[in-house]
Image (cartoon, rainbow, N blue to C red):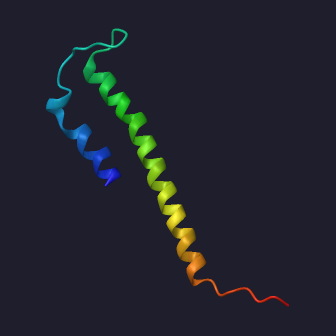
Amino acid sequence: MLLVIAIVLPLVVPIYARSEPALAGIPFFYWYQMLWVLIDSGLLWICYALIVREDRRRRAAVRPPEVDE
């Protein structure tokens, strides 16, 4: 779901098809897209962390119990 947000929202052009408000002289059209680069990287990191945690949990579930000698 997080990846859907990261893909779909930047594709909805009517949201950002304007020049105001400008940020440091940069039109909204450009800085909105650059903001999504940062947001997407954060969302991708969250997805990666969730996948790694789930992978570790599944591997631990199928690993045979260790025998004490």
- The residue at 53%/69% (across/down) is 55
In the picture shown, does residue 7 fall above or below 56? above
In the displayed structure image, the side of residue 2 where residue 58 appears, left or right = right
In-front residue for pair 5/27: 5
In the rendered image, which quarter contains the C terminus? bottom right
Report the quarter where the N terminus lies.
Answer: bottom left
In the displayed structure, does residue 43 sit left or right of residue 5?
right
Give the percent coordinates (x, y) of residue 41. Answer: 44, 41
**What residue is at 37 percent from the left and 10 percent from the top?**
24
Image position, residue 40 (x, y; %): 39, 41
For the point 44% across and 54% down, which residue is it? 47
Q: Residue 50 in the image: state x and y as whole percent.
A: 48, 59
Measuring 31% from the left and 30% from the top, which residue is drawn there? Answer: 33
* Residue at the right extreme, as displayed: 69
Q: Say which quarter of the image contains residue 15.
A: top left
Q: Quadrant of residue 28?
A: top left
